[in-house]
Amino acid sequence: MKKTALFLATAIVAVGCATADKSAPKNKINQEEVMARMSLEDKAHFVIGTGMAGFSGNDAVIGATRSLVPGAAGTTYPLDSLGIPAIVLADGPAGLRIDATREGDSATYYCTHFPIGTLLASTWNTQLVEAVGQAIGEEVKAYGADVLLAPALNIMRNPLCGRNFEYYSEDPVVAGKTAAAYITGVQKNDVGTSIKHFAANNQETNRMNNDARISQRALREIYLKGFEIAIKESEPWTVMTSYNYINGVYSSESKDLVQTILRDEWGYKGTVMTDWFGGKDGARQMWAGNDMLQPGKQEQFDSIVAGVKSGKLAEADLDRSVQRTLSLVEKSPRFQGYQYTNKPDLKAHAEVTRQSAAEGMVLMKNNGILPLESSKLNVALYGNTSYDFIAGGTGSGNVNHAYVVSLLDGLKNGGYTVSDELKNAYATYADDCKKAIEAEIEAASKKDPKNAMLLRFMPRPLPAEKLFSVDELTKQAEASDVAVITLGRISGEFVDRKVSDFNLSPSERKLIEQVCEVYHKANKQVVVLLNIGGVIETASWKDLPDAILCAWQAGQEGGNSVVDVLSGRQSPSGKFTMTWPVNFADVYSSKNFPIDQDPRIDMMNQGQKSTNVRNVDYTDYEEDVYVGYRYFDSFDVPVSYPFGFGLSYTTFDYADASCTADDDAITVKVTIKNTGAHEGKEVVELYVSAPDNKTNNKPVKELKAYGKTKSLKPGESDTLTLRVKTADLASFDEAASAWVVAEGEYQLLVGASSQDIKATLTAKVKAQQTKVNDVMKPQTQLHLLKR
């Protein structure tokens, strides 16, 4: 950094004086002079990163090698002679992902593992999400990273998408608002975020080559809307393009997406980067508006240089990307001379993750057993993951954390007594299963050495559940007050889930059936806990236990967070941001999703599209705008749990609902009163039903706003105000290439879920139309679902 500091005093980099704008960077780059000193080769290098050969953040793919933050995903290219340092890009979104240990260094660099994105969204509490983001950003800055590669907010199009655990919702309003809060929190630390994956990254199978074929309307209303909300509300430093094609064009090579929509229509001013190894033609990516290609390939460098020399790529386009990347570097802590400490407040952040995780857990069923208010209970703990709790997903969404609190440890910390006999039985069983699984992975690595490194990032299979005889269960029931069964699911990128992962396994089903039967005969009750990253089948067994709590994957304090809810220390207030179908086949997109297909995980096969396999090489989004509750509620398809569902330990009354409207917005007010015996919070959801929803093929209702009360004591009330802009009532008219608000009387539905409407209001709205660019049309005919 000495050379960089030297150049801060030159004309290349000017040191600015303090100004009233505290957000403005103190140290400035004289871009005009820097650009004048750069050769074509310098420019081409600068827009290509220097990380990630061998999945290390230190080894250059091309250009210079810099050891900055071991384990980071990559860096930008340094121009030392011009005083431009490399800045560090590191994975998220459940916490910073860097190496916890370093060669020749006795110190440790653990990061806090926060709850997965799905759990955070399930809080419906943007203030809480912002606080989590701020804590994550503190660790990013303390450990010397500059940009966090998060959040991920692609739509949960199908329950089996492998990365749903990182995503927020099937609904773009929830996804966009949650992402905006996360970004705002992280960037309060003067570090950046990279909102991803732009756009339509809704399956992992053949993700480098899959063509997502989507109508313009579904793109605009569903798959781009969340990005639009988050980008306009929080201004992320960077946007990351996705791996897939959209309507025949790589997203990273789509000028319609990156320039016309993102920049021209939405007004985005930041830097755009590719996903790691995304795209193939460097010159075309620059032309499209990608400013930085990560982690960098020699062929991209060659393509850019050759493109400028041949005239295929205008040097002005390259210059534009260089300038945007310079602006990114200028804002970074590293360029601003921040002296990172490597000592974030991990203890304080553990409290943040513990509290936030508890608020996002969803109480699915309760026959009066919860909360377990007496800590003097003897608990019989069943299920492999009760003892080996799953903190989060694998792959780039993983975090190198110092510990994970299991449910066993959480119960003990809460003062409960847990059966040692069961604990010892599970410990022996787990050791045997672990050896068998490791042997399988080693054999798979030898069989396919090319992808051996990737296999260690992929989700590990879980063993079958340990089963007990009726006599063993009877004896355990006699010695216990209550049984808790944990069902676990591994989440991770590279592969989509299988249908068998959605359904209960034979051993899981038998465990629930036998434990419930034996314990109920002994007049003892059973709680089922779901330690999962995505939706599973519940309709066939949910009548058996006395209570069900969806704990999701709650981060490193998971066991403590669960016990905070089970004990009543914190009342559950989470609600589902996705629909839980009765059967997997009930999801309309199941007709167009890769079911148990070869994932094709080779990271370097971008552009190797040699077959035309349906749902692998291309996927037709035939459900169109009818994603999630928009489909189930519009077509009256029964569900196991509706969108927005979640119980509490108390009850709430909705009263005095009213609305006012003007030309710009509709404002709805409603008073929520706690009418039960426990303290708690309530999420209020505002849906809108358009007057022309039947005649113009629109969903019967769509979420437009939501809010959450403060924590209400019994008898206490809170009045929420929810506001919907009139422009946000628009649907996309493909023929007119316009957002159109139909004139007429709209229904405002105030609900506790999409199927539990508490009050219906009406407002008259005048017609509006906003023209946009006619871009990103499907290149093949799609057979779209219509009402």
Image (spheres, grey):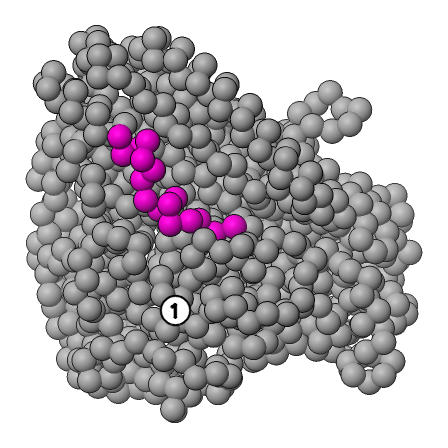
Q: Is residue 101 visible?
A: yes
Place residue 730 in its image quadrant: bottom left
For residue 505: magenta?
yes
**In front: 627, or 587?**
587
Residue located 34% across and 13% down the image: 422
Residue 507 point in image, percent of width and height: 32, 31
- Relative horizontal placement of residue 544, taking residue 741 as reference (left or right): left
- Residue range corresponding to the magenta coloring: 495-510
Check the image and report above or below for 782 versus 361. Answer: below
In the image, taking residue 330 as reference, residue 455 lies left or right, namely: left
Q: Nearer the viewer, residue 162 or 702?
A: 162
Q: Quadrant of residue 116?
A: top left
Question: Does residue 415 appear anywhere in the picture?
Answer: no
Quarter of the image with the C terminus in it: bottom left
View extreme (bottom): residue: 736
- Is residue 660 on the magenta stretch? no
- Please provide percent x and percent y for residue 178: 40, 54
Measured along the vertical axis of the image, is residue 50 above or below residue 563?
below
- How many C-alpha atoms fall within 10 Å of the one at disc 1: few (<14), some, or many (≥20)? many
The residue carrying mark 1 is 222
| SS class, disc 1 | helix
Quadrant location of the N terminus? top right
Eyeballing the image, is 505 above or below 475? Answer: below
Position of 762 with respect to 22 (left or right) is: left
Across the whole image, how many numbered discs are drawn on residues?
A: 1
The location of residue 17, given as percent across then percent down, is: 72, 55
In the image, what residue type sits under mark 1?
A: Ile
The residue sitting at 36% across, 27% down in the picture is 465
What residue appears at the point 18 percent right and 26 percent down from the top-left corner? 516
Q: Position of residue 766 (x, y in %)?
A: 23, 85
Residue at the spot 43% in from the left edge and 84% down from the top edge: 781
